[in-house]
Structures are given as structure tokens and as C-alpha cells.
Amino acid sequence: MTIPIEHVLTLSAILFTIGVTGVILRRNAIIVFMNIELMLNAVNLAFIGFAASMQSMTGVVFVFFILVVAAAEAVVGLAIMVEIFRNKQTLNIDELNLLKW
Amino acid sequence: MEIAFYLFGAVAAVAAASILVLRSPVYCAMALVGTLVCLAAIYILLNAEFVAAVQVLVYAGAIMVLFLFVIMMLNLKSDRPFALKFSLPKWLGLAVTVGILAQLIGVFNSSAVRTGPIGSYSEERVAQEGSTEIIGKLLFTEYVLPFEMISILLLVAVIGAVVLAKRRLKPEGEEGR
């Protein structure tokens, strides 16, 4: 492989950290959700990088499964957000504190 | 080929970072689409053409359209830019993420990740047989149980989404929808 595995993994680490930062800093629930998708994609990139480096297809098959889980998660999560918005008229996660304490 | 990797990697990182600072959720969604497309291009450079196609179709296509659909349906107000309301917990959170980044990069650049080839799918073999064919064979032989479980997961997600998002048969407050 001409692309060094360390560089692929470093890009994956950067994307994952941006996702974590977004989850911590942003207040809009949908944008928090997008950052979770970004973290899933960073893990996918690490899987593909390892698959190419180790000449194994297992990582690629796992990425396929992660894609399906992400799709299921997005569908259910967005349905929950639509329901929350209908009840509370907001998606600001600072105001959604019903389950806090 | 390496140049293309660094180019797409830089664009992916910049687009991902812009999710942190853009105000409108729609702009954030478009930036995420940019990241996903760049990642698909990197997958092609890493000999995973099938995953790249699925990434564009499922992620940049279906999932992000779902996001945009929900954003436009809910008619959200723009988020305030995060720079305006930095409090102590957020600074602490930012410090933790910097620690995570340093830790991840430190581990990823150690010699532990350099195991070398351990599988039998070399670049030439994947190019000869085609990654789609190899993944298909693996899915229906070695990974057939996870494959069936994932189909049940999708069924559960579809039923759950319908149950969550459908209108109540007897609305109590008649909230306009």
C-alpha cells in the first residue's frame, strides 16, 4: 500500500475528535446527531485503513455492518427528535432536561 | 495517489471542522455531505470500491436526505455560534477532546499498528476478483449470521420509526400536525 497506515489513522483520529468536540460544544440536537455520524465515519475509515494494511477483508465487511447500524440509528433517532419537537417545540439540548437529576 | 489522499483528507477535515462553527443546521448537513464524499474517495484509494459506492448511496444519499428532510420539516432556528457562549464546562470538555486527540494520534503512530499483512486478500487479488464479489462471498458464508441479524435490526428500526413518528389516532391537543 502506498498510503501509510499511520496517516490514514491520524486522519481518522482527527475526524473522531472533531465529532467528540461537536457533541460537547453544539446545542442543537440534530447537529449533535450529525457529529455522532461523523464519529462513526471516522471509525469506518480506521477499519478500511487497517483492512488495506493487513490485506484482510474483515474490516470492509465490518464497515458494511456499521453502515447499516448507522442507518437504523439515524432513522430511529430522527423519529425521536420529531416527536420531541412536537411536544416541546425545541431541540436545544440545554432545554431538554426532563430526565436530568 | 498519495497526493490525492492528502488532498481529500484535508478537505474532509476542513468540512468536518466547519460543522463545529456553522450556524445553520442545513449548512452543517452540507458540510457533512462534503466530508462523507471525501471519505468515499479515500475508500477508493484504499481499494474498497464497493464500500465507497455504498457510502455515497446510503450515507451521502439516504441518511443525509433524511437529516435535511427533518431539519426542513421542523423549521429550526439557527444555533448560536459556539464561540459566543464558552463556559467553564465547555473549556473542560475542549481540554478533554484535545487529550483524546493526543492519545489517539500517539497510539496510532506507535509500532503496534504496523502488523503487516496477515490476511490473504492482497491488492492484486482484490483487483482481480473485485471487492464487491469478495464482500458478497464473505457476507453469505463466513458472516451470514451477522448479516441476517443486521436485516432484523433494520426491520426493527423501520417498525420503531413508524411507531414513533406516526400521528396519534386520538390526538389530545391537536397540535397542528
Image (spheres, rainbow, N blue to C red):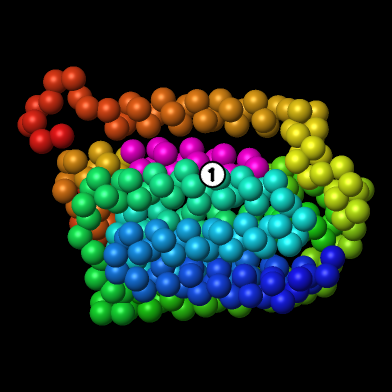
| Image height of B163 relative to A20, above or below | above
Q: Is residue A76 inside the magenta stretch?
A: yes
Residue lying furthest left: B173
Circle 1 sits in a helix, a strand or a loop, which is it?
helix
Is residue B80 toward the left or the right of residue B157 in the image? Answer: left
Which residue occupies 67% across, 75% down?
Answer: B6
Question: Quadrant where the N terminus of chain B lies?
Answer: bottom right
In the image: residue A2, left or right of residue B104: right
Taking the image as shown, residue B141 lies to the left or right of residue B33, namely: right
Task: Report the residue at 20% width, 24% height from top.
Answer: B168
Q: Nearer the viewer, residue A95 or B36?
A: B36
Of B29 and A57, the residue lying toward us: B29
Tell me how many marks there are. 1
Residue B65 vertical placement versus B45 (above, below):
above
**What subunit carries mark 1?**
B
Residue A63 seen by the camera = no
According to the picture, the residue beneath numbered tag 1 turns out to be: B58
Judge left or right: residue A39 versus residue B47. left
- Report the front residue among B94 and B138: B138
At horizontal 61% and vertical 45% (from top left) the residue drawn is: B54
**x and y, in percent, of residue B140 in the image:** 76, 28
Q: Which residues are magenta?
A: A64-79
Residue A13 can be seen, yes or no? yes
